[in-house]
Image: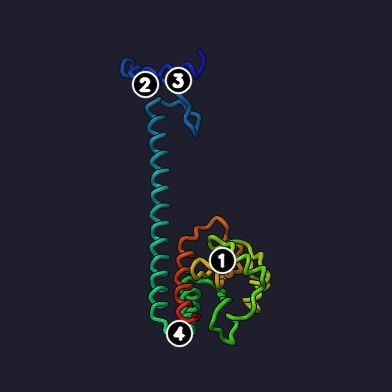
Amino acid sequence: MNAKDVVDYLQEHPEFFNEHAALLTTLAIPHPDTGKAISLSERQLLALRDKLHLLQEKMGNLIRFGEENDAISEKVHRLSLSLLEASSFENVRGELDTHLVEDFSVPHVALRIWNSIITRPTSEFEPVSEELRFFAADLRHPYCGPATQPEVAQWFGEAASHIRSLALLPLRRDNQVFGLLALGSEELERFYPEMGTLYVARIADLVGASLLKYLG
């Protein structure tokens, strides 16, 4: 008989320890930490404590994630209200800086728009390369990751050489990309490929809809 045979037998005969209850108090197995012999019931208690500890840790993480999501939702809500109240393109642009920089603590924010009927002599309407426009058109979700787009990094002016991670939010009109909202950071892990993009995508939708009112 080998160990598997013993396991199979006990699984097939769950009444075994009911019929041999005294065995539970006489069996001795090594303590998982000290190696000291303990009873089977003590070992079960230790296992239950370990499971409880893991459950408490998971619950703590869930609560923390929930609180973080609530905080982000509140920030998105405040941004939404400010964009609804904006009465011009300049107002929309100003609210973006106010909320993304001050509320979301994004150090660098840049915006580029193309294929717009209405333009302005500002940086938001400066030419964008065809390659970057194609890149933006292919985005199905916001890009979050290393700053591998030198052209976008230049949008941040003097900070360009220090940008290490980016979030690129495609702005759409009828599923056609008409611009990019770029968020930059000197921290490599601020925007990373595995991060969730739900709220970032919602911000892109809000900004795109707000801008279209003034772009034609």
Asked if marks 1 and 4 touch (Cβ < 8 Å), the reply is no
The kind of secondary structure element at disc 2 is helix
> For mark 1, what is the residue?
167
The mark closer to the camera, 1 or 4, is 4
The amino acid beneath tag 1 is Ala
Residue at the extreme bottom of the image, as rendered:
121
The answer to whether residue 183 is above or below residue 144 is: below
Q: Residues within 10 Å of mark 2 (few under 14, many from 20)?
A: some
> For mark 2, what is the residue?
24
Report the residue at 42% width, 82% height from top. Answer: 86
> For mark 4, what is the residue?
88
Q: x%, y% of residue 89? A: 48, 83
> For mark 3, what is the residue?
7
Q: Residues within 10 Å of mark 3 (few under 14, many from 20)?
A: few
Q: Is residue 194 left or right of residue 99?
A: right
Q: Quadrant of residue 183?
A: bottom right
The amino acid beneath tag 2 is Leu
Q: Is residue 19 left or right of residue 172?
A: left
